[in-house]
């Protein structure tokens, strides 16, 4: 499974748990957890994009060493 989709799925589940609980402290904790999962998804996207960009630069320039 795509890690970003999985992180977002976890965030959705946390939001559902927050809506289902009557305890305000528990609700806040579930919502906080959801925000953390979304932050993980965003961080993964940023790092994956940076990795792809770096790989593209390495691949586009060819080898710097003479054979």
Image (spheres, grey):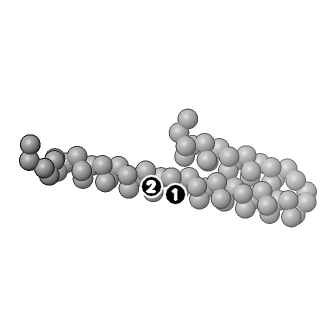
Q: Position of residue 60 (x, y in %)?
A: 19, 48
> Label 2: which residue?
47
* Mark 2: secondary structure: helix
Question: In screen coordinates, is 50 left or right of 39?
Answer: left
The furthest residue to the left = 66
Question: In screen coordinates, is 60 left or right of 43?
Answer: left
* Mark 1: secondary structure: helix
Q: Residue at x 16, y 47 (%)?
A: 62
Which disc, if any, is residue 24?
A: none
Q: Residue at x 56, y 52 (%)?
A: 41
The one nearer the camera, 48 or 20, is 48
Q: Does the residue at mark 1 contact the one at mark 2 (Cβ under 8 Å)?
A: yes
The furthest residue to the right = 22
Q: Residue at x 87, y 63 (%)?
A: 24
Q: Position of residue 56 (x, y in %)?
A: 27, 49
Q: Name the quarter where the N terminus is drawn.
A: top right
Q: Name the quarter where the C terminus is drawn.
A: top left
Question: In screen coordinates, is 5 left or right of 28?
Answer: left
- Label 1, residues with CA under 10 Å away: few <14, some 14-19, many ≥20: few
Which disc, if any, is residue 43?
A: 1
- Label 2, residues with CA under 10 Å away: few <14, some 14-19, many ≥20: few
Q: Residue at x 74, y 50 (%)?
A: 14
Q: CA distance from mark 1 to mark 2?
A: 6 Å
């Amino acid at each position: 499974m795509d890690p970003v989709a999985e992180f977002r799925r976890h965030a959705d589940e946390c939001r559902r748990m927050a809506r289902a609980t009557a305890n305000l402290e528990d609700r806040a904790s579930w919502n906080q957890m959801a925000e953390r999962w979304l932050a993980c998804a965003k961080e993964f996207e940023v790092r994956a994009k940076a990795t792809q960009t770096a790989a593209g630069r390495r691949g586009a320039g060819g080898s710097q060493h003479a054979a």
